[in-house]
Image (tube, rainbow, N blue to C red):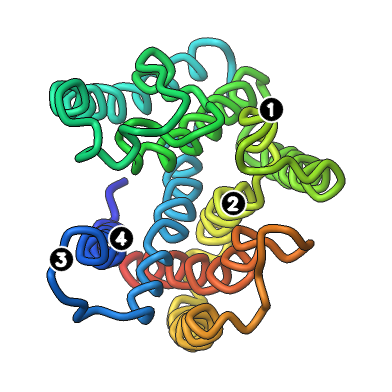
Amino acid sequence: MKLNNLQVLRAIAAYMVLLVHIEDIEAKRGIGHILGPWTDIGDWGVDLFFVLSGFVMVLVSHNTLGGLKDAGKFLWSRATRIYPLWWLCLSALVPIWLFRPELVYGGTQQEISLLKDYLLIPKTESPLLQTGWTLIHEMYFYIFFAVLLMMPLGERRRLPLLILWGTVAVGLGLILNPSRGEEPILRIVTHPMVFEFLAGAVAAFLWRSTKGALGVPALAAGVAALIIGMTLYVNGALGADTGGFMTHDRARVILFLPSAALLTYGAASIELR
């Protein structure tokens, strides 16, 4: 089933992310400074993308009992959506990096491994094409979901395992607290944004079970949560820092996950009805 409203949300997410990168480019390359800190609200686009990914994964795996064949089919379909375009964009950047590394966002960092970047394997620093960090998170969740699909459990029994996995993974992150530059694989596995994939998956299960009955209230609540979350995020209301418990990543998940999940459920529901 293809839901057009989800495509609309993807477009909104893409423009939000674009807003952040335009401000970043202006700060580095521009003559003046027109855009301000308010553009940080564009970060919400990434969180929305992750919630949508969790929703779509449940959507495309509906009616699959599970097993090696279903898992392989799922992983192949996801990988072929990501890797070809990623390889094309990264390859276009490599010649620029070879001759003018200072023009590439990640061109002057200490650890540059093209093999890891092409395969989207976590490393201590960002990929050469910096936006690929989101795809690394995507591939991690795809792989875990494919492992889950290997077990012939059926759709309803997957949800408890997803919740258990998310709770354990993020719980380990709270205990071990891996830093941004250390233990890159552990940091991805225990990253708080795992909850956003999980929230999207839960939203899809609820969407099926309720048949979209709560779509309008969910949209209203989602808009309210979005306004509150963005306001608090821009003003740094949670006091996020890189040294304390409330890191930037944890703060953005707390502020952005509710609105992204509610709007995804609501948008899919009103189209269904």
Question: What amino acid is found at the position of numbered circle 1 in the picture?
Answer: Leu
Residue contact at pointers 1 and 4, CB within 8 angstroms: no
Viewer-nearest of discs 1 and 3: 3
| Side of 246 where 128 appears, left or right | left
Q: Decide which of tag 3 and tag 4 comes sooner along the chain.
A: 4
Q: How far across and down, in percent of the image, does residue 202 sit?
A: 60, 55
Q: How far across and down, in percent of the image, does residue 243 sit?
A: 73, 58
Q: How far across and down, in percent of the image, does residue 203 sit?
A: 55, 59
- Separation of marks 4 and 2 at Cα, in angstroms: 16 Å
Q: Which mark is residue 153?
A: 1
Question: What amino acid is found at the position of numbered circle 3 in the picture?
Answer: Gly
Q: Residue at x 37, y 62 (%)?
A: 45
Q: Quadrant of the C terminus?
A: bottom left
Mark 2 — residue?
Answer: 193
Q: Residue at x 67, y 58 (%)?
A: 242
Q: Decide which of tag 1 and tag 4 comes sooner along the chain.
A: 4
- Separation of marks 2 and 1 at Cα, in angstroms: 25 Å
Mark 4 — residue?
Answer: 17
Q: Secondary structure at mark 3?
A: loop
| Side of 234 where 155 appears, left or right | right
